[in-house]
Image: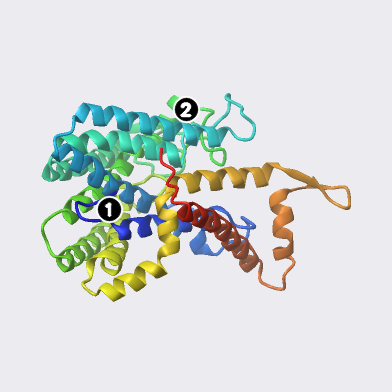
Amino acid sequence: MKTSEQRLHSLDAFRGFTIAAMLLVNNPGDWNNLYPQLEHAAWSGWTFTDTIFPFFLFICGVSMHLSLGHRAAEGANKLRLLRRLGKRAALIFLIGFTLNLIPTFDFGTVRLPGVLQRIALCTLLAAPIVLYFSWRQQCAWIVAILLTYTLIMLFVPVTDVNGTWATGALEPGRDVGGWLDRAFMNGHLWKKAKTWDPEGLLSSLPATCSVLFGVLAGNFLSQARTSAEKTVWMLQAGLACLWLGQIMHSFVMPINKSLWTSSFCIFMTGWAAIAFSSFYWLLDGNSDDELKRQMRKLSSPFIMYGVNALFLFTLSGMIAKMLGFIHLTQADGSSASLQKVLFAPMHALPVAAVNASLLYAVLFNLCMLTIAYLLWKKRWVIKV
């Protein structure tokens, strides 16, 4: 989380922006009334919402280099670092699994994958590559993983949900990843699909590459270059990834978040690099101290989110679940969830349904920001 000279305010702010966006899209007042950019693409393609998870994995990679990479370079015991990271990943996985258990605590049907579970798995897979291989070798790992994943998805035949053999069928439940998820986690998958999972096993491989791309960005930031050079090169790398991802979308595999296709991984890395380079230049990179001071002040809400990102994400998930399973008796004798009761005054406003739904999400975000502010004032940083 720190460079040799100072904490990267830009990394905290970018992380906080990503968490704020995640809270916004995860907590609408009405799931049936959303702006298109505030929900995932139905299948192939992408929206603003589809950028959030790859952004967070990219940020995890930058942080991993700035922590693990520096410790390893200073001579720290690599096996000890791996064991420590393994314990942390296990705890993150357990937190995600516990969130999935709430409120029924039904171990027979609980979903095994999830956002935190994928973060834990990708961290475990990426850590040895970060500790034991140079940045050039890390590039080779990325190419090898994405190429292998692409070949498996396009050319390995498997039986789909109907028992029919299919090869290269990049459709819900018909792909190799869906087959693998059913083979190992049948009955414990995403309830909306049941036959596949957007955070499944096989697609965690290219998701790990999203982390490794962030590692490369962190490595580049550590080099002895001017801030302007770092910003420009990250921007150019981001544009190149956008171009390459779009080419792959047209000729190899579609951009698809649920499958985390190779084109999706590279394309979203492009947006992550562009966004991060912008935060970096405004908050850390430019030479105008007054501008940096003003931008850090303006971005302070994001920084408040960023320093306690994992805790706030977990807490927001707990609160959202509680709002859903706590029911209140209405005046007419009917029962309604606490979330619906809180949303009712906004739903009654003379505004479009999508705006009422968005207003609820914004207010939920502001409540979480209040908690982030209190933690910030107390200088409490809750780590796993």
Look at the image and tell me in which quarter the C terminus lies: top left
In this view, 177 is above or below 307: above
- Choose top left, top right, bottom left or bottom right for residue 156: top left
| Residue 119, percent from left and from top | 38, 40
- Choose top left, top right, bottom left or bottom right for residue 288: bottom left
Give the class, few, some or many, for how many residues have Cα within 10 Å of label 1's Cα (few <14, many ≥20).
many
The amino acid pointed to by label 2 is Met
Residue 187 in view (yes/no)? yes
Query: Among all residues in the image, which is located at the extreme front?
Result: 378
Give the class, few, some or many, for how many residues have Cα within 10 Å of label 2's Cα (few <14, many ≥20).
some
Q: Do labels 1 and 2 touch, CB within 8 Å?
A: no
Instruction: Judge left or right: residue 125 versus residue 185.
Output: left
The residue shown at (55%, 35%) is 100
- Choose top left, top right, bottom left or bottom right for residue 356: bottom right
The residue shown at (24%, 61%) is 238
Instruction: Measure the alpha-carbon separation of dots 1 and 2.
Output: 28 Å
Upstream in the sequence, badge 1 or badge 2?
Answer: 2
Out of 310 and 332, give the one closest to the viewer: 310
| Residue 16, percent from left and from top | 41, 56
Disc 2 element:
helix
- Residue that carries the numbered disc 1 in the rendered image: 266
Disc 1 element:
helix
Residue 41 in view (yes/no)? no
- Residue that carries the numbered disc 2 in the rendered image: 185
In this view, 250 is above or below 348: above
The amino acid pointed to by label 1 is Ile
Instruction: Judge left or right: residue 39 versus residue 307.
Output: right
Instruction: Judge left or right: residue 290 versus residue 330.
Output: left
Out of 321 and 34, give the one closest to the viewer: 321
Instruction: Judge left or right: residue 128 versus residue 294.
Output: left
The residue shown at (47%, 31%) is 94
